[in-house]
Image: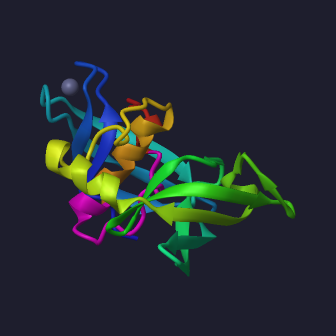
Amino acid sequence: MVAPSALVLKCELCGAEAPHRVLRGKIGGKDEIVFEGTVKCPNCGRVSTVVTREPKPIQIPLVVSWLDKSERTSLEFSPEENVAVGEELDLADSRIEVTAVEAQGRRVAAARAKEVATVWAKRIDRVRVKFSVNKGNRGPGPCGRHRPDVRAHRARAVFPVIQGTPPRRSKALSSAVGWSLSQ
Ligand SMILES: [Zn+2]
């Protein structure tokens, strides 16, 4: 696994929560993804050594409806992440809203990703387009609600962008935002 070229971290010196450039680093770990390396704060230039860990993402089956069609796909989640009805996520170039969650054989309002069997969602692209024009593709949801997951969600999006891979996962890999700097 290749180390990312940047990680969203909170700087201990200036407090900025921003994508830190990875100067050196490697990714390892079996049951979790462990990053060890040296990063630089984009705000104050502080160089520090960090070790971060996060659980490996899991794939959850996803059924997305759009007009009168539905499509089966899957989406990556961190195992402990909460998946809730009404939540908005990015799926490739689309914006989707979770309409149902099945866990342990029944429909629930929310569940931890590792307990979820299937997620149903509908595309809400129209909203996203309007939103993109105004603010670019980042920031809180189009409705302006500030849910606790918004920050983490935004941070995750940094990964694919910086690595130059398609942003196929939105809610995924990296709860990078939860990572903290260690000496
Ligand atoms: Zn800093």
Q: Quadrant of the N terminus?
A: bottom left
Q: Is residue 81 left or right of residue 33?
A: right
Residue 98 seen: yes
From the viewer's perspective, is residue 140 above or below residue 116?
Answer: above
Rendering coords of residue 89 (x, y %): 45, 54
Query: What's the residue at 24%, 56% (across, down)?
Result: 129
* x 49%, y 38%: residue: 149
Q: Is residue 129 left or right of residue 45?
A: right
- Expressed as whole percent of the image width and height from the top left, the position of residue 52 reads 46, 44
Residue in the picture at 29% in, 27% down: 11
* Secondary structure predominantly adopted by residues drawn in magenta: loop
The residue range painted magenta reads 160-175
Nearer to the camera, 24 or 148 = 148
Q: How is the image coloured?
A: rainbow
Check if residue 163 falls in the magenta segment.
yes
Q: Choose top left, top right, bottom left or bottom right for residue 70.
A: bottom right
Quadrant in the picture for residue 12: top left
- Give above or below for 109 relative to 72: above
Image quadrant of ligand 1 equals top left
Q: Position of residue 35 (x, y in %)?
A: 42, 52
Query: Which residue appears farthest toward the right when viewing the image?
Result: 105
Which of the pair 124/155 is nearer the observer? 124
Q: Which residue is most to the front?
A: 68
Residue 114's image quarter? bottom right
Give the residue furthest to the top: 14
| Residue 100 pos. (x, y %) | 67, 58
Residue in front for this viewpoint, 85 or 7: 85
Q: Is residue 130 left or right of residue 52?
A: left
